[in-house]
Amino acid sequence: MKPTIDRGAPATVTVVIPCYNYARYLPDAVGSALSQPGVIVDVVIVDDASTDNSLETARQLAAGDARITIVSHVRNAGPVETFNDGLRIARGEFLVRLDADDLLTPASLERSVAVMRQFPSVGLVYGHPLHFSGEDLPAHRGRPTAWTVWPGRKWLADRCKTGFNVITSPEVLMRRCVVDQVGGQMPLAHTHDMEMWLRMSAFSDVAYVNGADQAWHREHSQSLSAREVDGFRDLLERRAAFETLFVGPAGALSEATDLRSAATRALASHSIEVAKRLYDHVEVDRELVAALRNFARELVPDVEKIPGWRGLDRRAAIGPGPAARHPVFFLERVARGLRDAWRRRRWHCAGY
């Protein structure tokens, strides 16, 4: 659908910025929110008992701009409680969760709000994030080419079918009344964002801004995901997200059983795929292979019927060295590489 920007009365947007030891990044994050055109923005900075000068930096920023509110924790509570505390005092019609080391691109909120206003059934809008490292921001695209709107449960079914999250986080705009309906983030270690997006899609439609970059996401060694998440942990965390989703209000959906089954089979399939990829190398961590096998079997009792299980058995029987050089498995790696490249391109172009 061709995008149009409504130049009527500006919408109100609250940007909640959880912050822990990110004093050096905080001014840029806040500035990227407060400089957004076409919307009325207020910022809630929630300092999670930082041990650097984050709180002092936040207070200096607030002293110079009445649009900034500060919440400070006396003890470290973690990212979920930190965001939820900011959410409780949010005043805007729309909401953004912006980590203190990320930034919004210029006019990001105006583009997302335009979608929300044209489609009242949409509760969540996202777009393409630019991942970067270092100090220089990469050039961004500012002109949207189209809007895509999915029925929420169709979008949810697609996420269950693949088992993957397609959203980073700062590129999301949420409709406040939908968040009030479904609640804030759940106490998950790493997939609290993912679970919330899935839960919102169970009760509202989802939209995507095509052609424009909606946020900058900073990659660095001190980020939570970089420090604590590896491939196997990622599988465990995604399983926790789906389990939490379906014991919550989404579990009452008529299609919940089928959705949950699709998600568990997708995670089992990915676990098998990860185990197979370990045999691409001469040295193989056999304990990790066993853990991945057990994970898949816990999810799907008839795991032998999952595509790839027999291929994993063949690799184990041949052994890591010969398996890495086997011509059939080599061709599989080539096909896998092409498939992965196509998926990455689809995500960059269409958001899923």
Image (spheres, helix red, strand yellow):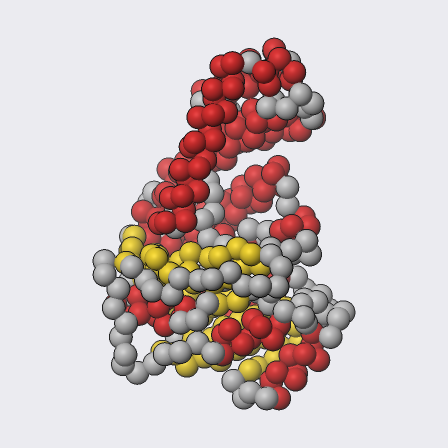
Query: Furthest-left residue in view?
Result: 1
Residue depicted at 40% across the width and 58% down the height: 127
Q: Is residue 59 above or below residue 19?
A: below
At horizontal 35% and vertical 68% (from top left) the residue drawn is 111
- Image check: 81 left or right of 214? right
In this rendering, position of residue 2 left or right of residue 154: left
Q: Residue 136 is drawn in which quadrant?
A: bottom right
Residue 261 placed where, x, y %? 42, 35
Q: Is residue 194 above or below residue 66?
A: above
Residue 338 image position (x, y, % from top left): 43, 31
Residue placed furthest toward the top: 318
In the image, residue 277 above or below residue 57: above
Mark count:
0
Does residue 67 appear in this view? yes
Q: Residue at x 47, y 25 (%)?
A: 334
The picture places residue 55, in percent across and down from the top left corner, at 69, 77
- Nearer the observer, 235 or 349: 349
Could you tell me which quadrant the N terminus lies in? bottom left
Residue 89 seen from this side: no
Question: In terms of depth relative to the viewer, which is nearer, 214 or 80?
Answer: 214
Q: Residue at x 68, y 72 (%)?
A: 23
Q: Position of residue 343 (x, y in %)?
A: 41, 39
